[in-house]
Image (spheres, rainbow, N blue to C red):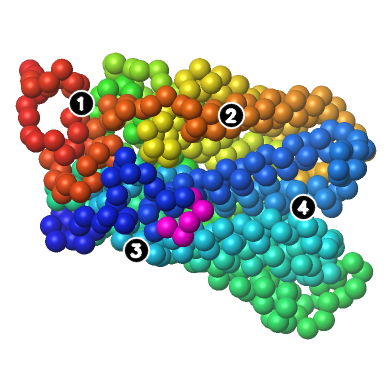
Amino acid sequence: MASPRNPLHAADHSSATNAQAGYPSVFSFSTHHRVIGRQYFFLSLAAVLIGIVLSLLMRLHIVWPQAPLPFLGQIKPEQYLAYMTMHGTLMVFFVLSVAPQNAFGNLVLPEQIGARVMAFPRLNMLSFWTTLISFFVMVSALFVTGGGSMSGWTQYPPLSATISAGAGQGLGTDLWIVSIAIFCVASLMSAVNFITTILRGRAEGMSLMRMPLTVWSWFVTAMLTLLAFSVLLAAALLLFSDRHWGTSFYLPAGLVVNGAAMAGHSGGSPLLWQHLFWFFGHPEVYIAILPGMGVTSHMLSTFSRKPVYGYRSMVYSLLAIGVLGFMVWGHHMFVAGISPYAVMAFSTLTMVIAVPSSVKVINWLGTLRGGRIRFTIPLLFSVGFVSLFITGGLSGPILAQPAVDMYLHDTYFVVAHFHMIMGMAAVFAIFAATYFWFPLLFPDRIMNEQLGRAHFWFTFIGAYATFMPMHFLGLAGNPRQYSQIVGSAEYLQKLLPIHVFITISAFVLASAQLIFIYNLIYSALRGKFSGTNPWESTTLEWEQDRRQRIRVHHGPYEFGPREDSRRDYTVQSEPPYTYKS
């Protein structure tokens, strides 16, 4: 229980102003957590728009490699690889790591625990501006001599550790490494802030088991971020050292690049990078998806008008996923020649981590069962999250089998798997959160429902039409990272019609986001007024008077008829009451 003298609860007229008073501009150096949340949101929005454009350029080149494009001409294979690298990096780091955690966490977390402000407001502000610098450094790599890095978002050495390896492996790769290092520093600052705020800033009566599941998901994600990004930061510094300072962390002796033997390196191992990167990389999957799990649990309870089914098991499964997420990185390296005993251990742990994930699915379905369901836009996207999480997750145990993974690892099957579960599922949670907390993102406004429904159905259908066929491409042996199908192996030519279908579906999926952008702008400027607590939620972010000290009396999801009111919900800060029998 938080101390009643905790400074995070004190009235702060500069940082915890009343909702009706508005917030400073997103272009300001504000320490207000909601301003910072909006800044993160718009940063992720810019990153996802660039990432979508790059993905469409990639799809066009795969299907019609000779077609000239306006302003770009004919895309060369090295440009394709640079687009692929930038697309993956922007989406993984600046969208999936930033939007679910930093944007919406900053927007509502302090209010959900009754803290009013983040523990370190200035550190919070510094974290955003550091992330913004990282973003500009990353995007600038596309415009330097030689173009962006061609090594993919995983940056495997020795290609990424060798400046002379090809176009984009010079300044473009340096900028990639510097950007990721800066991003890691910003993420560590943010993680410390989140953890401290949750542990030290909770209002009186807000015990751990009274925290909303959104807060639990942000808490576990912050711990994963603190441990995983510190390792990636060290790995990036070692990679930069190999490139410029003559070290040999990842470069072995006798390496031949472009017909010339490299001198001055000995004793390094490219596998060291893979171990370090995937020790970060697999927790990164959960950094992207765990906030979505919390948001989905929150939405399903709110719009089925019943408590979360198995609240404690949901909390423990979040913690289990967080712990096990650090033990399965080796399944990304089954084809790398690691010990068969290690392969057996990583395969077993990968299948074990499916258990807490299955617990969450059962609890989500249990929450919906028998509920008085309100089919709002946030609920539709939350159900879409559950659908994509199940569909994408089913291929996980398949890839956990070493004998199967040896065949499927470098094919489109893996592309389909991580786009379904890490990409689209997490994006659906971001959409659900945007529609739900829009009155806090743009005070007192609500998004258009008709446009929201159109956006959902086009996105839902487009997601399945784009990524489900990739499983069949992988089963047919289509390698990933090939820049074109025309002119490749003969067996790949028969797969060209599937690629054409995927490309058309990708354009439909991208076009659906134009509906969202229009709805976002229109609703921010001329949307209907939301009123107080428009979704009749039980948690504290909808409280209006921010100067009054909060004391929590109830759990986060108490729905049911009251004796003293016609309402079917009880806000956590309301005085005790009794249910009707």
Residue at x 31% of width, y 21% of height: 304
Mark closest to the chain's N terminus, 1 or 2:
2
Q: Amino acid at mark 4?
A: Ala
Task: Verify whether residue 56 appears in magenta.
Answer: no
Q: Secondary structure at mark 4?
A: helix
Residue 82: mark: 4
Q: Which residue is mark 1?
A: 569
Q: Which residue is mark 2?
A: 518
Depth check: give the residue in front, 568 or 161.
568
- Which percent across, then down, holds residue 126? 46, 64
In the image, the segment drawn in magenta is 26-30
Say whether marks 4 and 3 touch (CB < 8 Å). no
Q: Amino acid at mark 3?
A: Phe
For the stretch drawn in magenta, the main secondary structure is loop
Residue 499 lies left or right of residue 275; in this view the side is: right
Q: Which residue is mark 3?
A: 120
Residue 511 lies left or right of residue 486; in this view the side is: left
Depth check: give the residue in front, 85 or 565.
565
